[in-house]
Amino acid sequence: MRKPRIIVYNDEQSLLDLLEACFSKWGCEVFSYRYPVVCPVNGNSVHGCKCQEPCADLMLSDFLLPQMTGTELFWRQAERGCKVAAKAKAIMSGYSKEKLLRFCENSGYRYFEKPLDYKELIGWLGECWSNYDPLKQLGGSPEKVRYESRQGIEHCLNSSGLQEECEGWKIVSPVQLFQASLN
């Protein structure tokens, strides 16, 4: 039996680490990329997807990535035969535009506004997991791309769980920050 596999694209290291920690805590296998990789199995190859099955259960991408947008990344993936369904893909953006929201809805992608509402993210995962089959094999194995040095990420919370200035506040890890957002 396998874990659910999630591929995350975000060039903001702290958010990428936070999402990776959250999804891992939820029991997922997580592959994270700071740069758009059109095919996580075959790299940015111009050749079509060689996998017979999807390479992931879910994909989550920031809208503004280096070299292209998250929607362009998903379009390029589909153009090359990506088997991950549009409903299993989501775009997150801090630049909430009605046009982007409509585009995501029309394309079948889920849209999340930044800062992320983790309860909303958990709700989407729940919707997606209703179709999750732990016995179904995935195609290929994404290359695990990590970074030469991991930053020590710390966030600050006040007593109500809000992230604000650090002076006189409690320092917490990304996982603690996530747990506080659930309360």
Image (tube, helix red, strand yellow):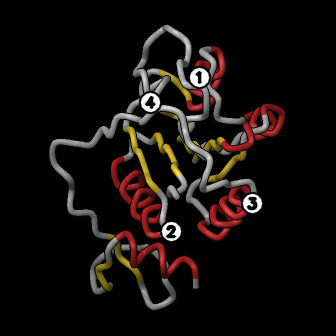
Disc number placed over residue 26 in the picture, else none: 2
User: Please, what secondary structure does the residue beneath circle 1 have?
Assistant: helix
- In the picture, measured across the screen, residue 98 lies left or right of residue 156, that is right
Tell me the kind of residue under disc 2: Trp
Relative to residue 130, is residue 65 depicted above or below?
above
Tell me the kind of residue under disc 1: Gln
* Earlier residue among tags 2 and 4: 2
* Earlier residue among tags 2 and 1: 2
Q: Residues within 10 Å of mark 2 (few under 14, many from 20)?
A: few
Tell me the kind of residue under disc 3: Ser
Disc number placed over residue 40 in the picture, else none: 4
Q: Which residue is mark 1?
A: 77
Disc number placed over residue 130 in the picture, else none: 3
Spot occupied by residue 170 in the image (x, y as percentages of width and height): 31, 85
Instruction: Please state which of the two labelled residues, at mark 3 or mark 1, is closer to the viewer.
Output: 3
- In the picture, measured across the screen, residue 86 lies left or right of residue 13, that is right
* Earlier residue among tags 3 and 4: 4
Measure the C-alpha gap from mark 2 to mark 3: 15 Å
User: Please, what secondary structure does the residue beneath circle 2 have?
Assistant: loop
